[in-house]
Amino acid sequence: MTEAQHDLAAKATTLARLHSAPGILQVVNVWDVISAKTIAAVPGTKALATASHSIAASLGYEDGENIPLEEMITAVGRIAAATDLPVSADLESGYGDPGDTVRRAIGVGIVGANIEDQMRPLPDAVAQMEAVLRAGTSEGIDFVLNARTDAFVKAGDRAPADVLADAVERGRAYLAVGATTVFVPGLLDEHTVTALVEAFGPQRLSVINVPGSLAPSRLEELGVARISYGPWTQRVALTALAGAARDLLADGALPEGTLPLN
């Protein structure tokens, strides 16, 4: 094993350990090199995660695998090269070939990923996740799969109990084939989070925090492994930019306390 391969394998091990540790892992999502460097320098940051929506938006594409795979791999590779921290990439549903997509991502320094099931038939979704894990094994690392089920985001008007049952069935299936965690995006209340943790076990559930979500401290108490923020971090930055622009165009000044972070 080369020094670079050893370093990559060590980062994968570190990322897996951060998910299983009793303290919750928070990943403040990034979308380019300067956002990655900025977040990596914030005390308490232990790992980085990319946001596919934000990367696509920054390059002029709509979310939903509209960005060409080559551009996504280049973007996440630049982020991985900009930090010594382990990086997990949001690779959507794998761009038609999850195994090969993850293999290419590992090649540019990525040691974990979100892969969406998009509510495909369960056998097909499980096969996706298995392909991802095989890619990690073939590249010599214990790849950290944050297997995403879209049960809640695609719930429509279905009964909440049925949606929860789907999320549980799918999440258990992904854990059974080796996923590190199950990512269940959506605005989840405490009852739902508790039910999911009970179904998967402690430090196996990954959630996204959006406006109105439970506080990180409460999620930690409930046994959640990981919190991410998806496109919301870029929205925070853009909201601040738009507010500053309004002030400047109204004869204002740059905001007090602005730092030369770039």
Image (cartoon, rainbow, N blue to C red):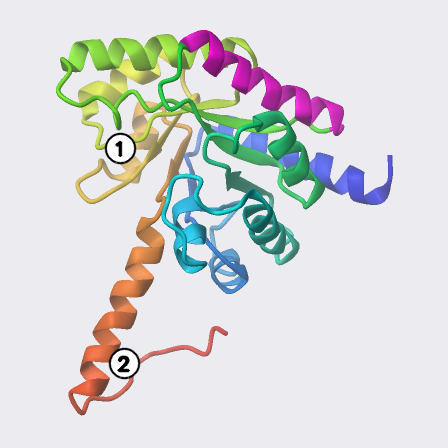
Could you tell which of marks 1 and 2 lies nearer the N-terminus? 1
Q: Which residue is mark 2?
A: 255
Q: CA distance from mark 1 to mark 2?
A: 33 Å
Residue closest to the eye, 213 or 21: 213
Q: Position of residue 161 (x, y in %)?
A: 18, 10
210 left or right of 2 in image? left
Q: Which region shows up in magenta?
A: 122-140
- Tell me the SS state at disc 2: loop
Q: Which residue is mark 1?
A: 218
Q: Position of residue 119 (x, y in %)?
A: 35, 19
Q: Amino acid at mark 1?
A: Arg
Up the image or down, 57 lies above or below 101; here it is below
157 left or right of 103 in image? left
Up the image or down, 16 lies above or below 176; here it is below
Q: Amino acid at mark 2?
A: Pro
At 26% from the left and 31% from the top, the residue drawn is 186
